[in-house]
Image (cartoon, rainbow, N blue to C red):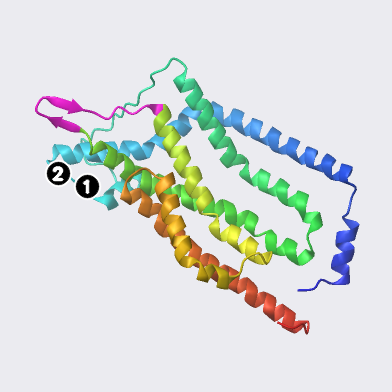
Amino acid sequence: MTHTDQDEADIEASRAPLMDHLIELRGRMIVCVVAFILAFIGCFYVSADIQIFLIKPFQAAYALHAAAQAAGQHGGNPFELIAVTAGFHHLPPGAQTDLVLQATGPLEQLFTKMKVAGFGAVVVVFPVLAWQLYKFVAPGLYRNEKGAFLPFLFVAPLLFLVGAALVYFVMLPFVMWFSLSQQIAADGITVELNTKISEYLSLVTSLILAFGLCFQLPVVTTLLGMAGIISSKMMAEVRRYAIVAVVVLAAVVTPPDPISQLMLAVPLVLLYEISIWCVRLIELRRKKADEAEGLPA
């Protein structure tokens, strides 16, 4: 697609010497650093509340697993597990909810709070980082490119939240239920799951970041399609290889159980198909715009 003389004039007017760009970049980086520090301080102040929030899925799995054992059952209702974690369903009467996690080092809990605060700060400050990035690159974009790029600033956080919600409400309860089911109590031998708080929260934050980033697939592919780097035809042709790559990625970033791997692999395959349609839509709009301008397709 060609650009109008007004577009070229806008780009030319936005040109600045290299030093000016570096000064602007430094200013925007300072804004991001200050925002992160303020968010870190705020998250550290409420780090105990963040920890409790992140432990809730484990508590739900623990309580329902204990209730199932007390009733002589070996399995649980997966929908009940999700409903309890989401707060839509109450725990069984008398369910054991006193979950104890271990801190084996004198400063382990302090460092864990700092890691949780850092994780929370990244999530809180992400809109600021995205906006500063957009404001830095916007002068070098044409007007139609600015209009196309801006919606992704809102779509990217939304997709990240969808991935994080899948981890929190679905994957974590199942993973912890599966871990609790591996305990042994027979013939005078007991093997109990005594989870360290640092290891559990590292698992939680790693899964949330992994799912949140993986769910950016439509955003990344659509931007690449807008730039003309990839096409819907290319993506359709390599679909089988992409599915293999998704399965391998799911096996690497999730715990070693098939349920967790499927919980990541299936949504990613669906997102890949959605990405193909997004790129195809961009190509159709570009073709119509070229035809309207009298350009060859």
Distance CA(mark 1)–CA(mark 2): 8 Å
Q: Residue furthest left?
A: 187
Q: Position of residue 152 (x, y in %)?
A: 63, 58
* Placement of 235 over or under 19, stated as above or below: below
Question: What residue would you read off at disc 1?
Answer: 76
Disc 1 is placed on an element classified as loop
Q: Residues within 10 Å of mark 1 (few under 14, many from 20)?
A: some
What's the residue at 23%, 50% (across, down)?
77
What kind of residue is marked 2?
Gln
- Residue numbers of the magenta segment: 184-197
Asked if residue 92 can be seen in this view, the reply is yes
Q: In this image, 224 relative to 87: left or right?
A: right
Q: Position of residue 225 (x, y in %)?
A: 63, 66
Q: In this image, 109 relative to 101: left or right?
A: right
Quarter of the image with the N terminus in it: bottom right
Asked if residue 83 can be seen in this view, the reply is no
Q: Position of residue 24 (x, y in %)?
A: 82, 42
Q: Quadrant of residue 228?
A: bottom right
Q: Residue furthest top?
A: 106
Quarter of the image with the C terminus in it: bottom right
Q: Position of residue 70 (x, y in %)?
A: 15, 37
Q: Is residue 193 in the magenta section? A: yes
Question: What residue would you read off at disc 2?
Answer: 73
Tell whether label 2 touches label 1 (CB within 8 Å).
yes
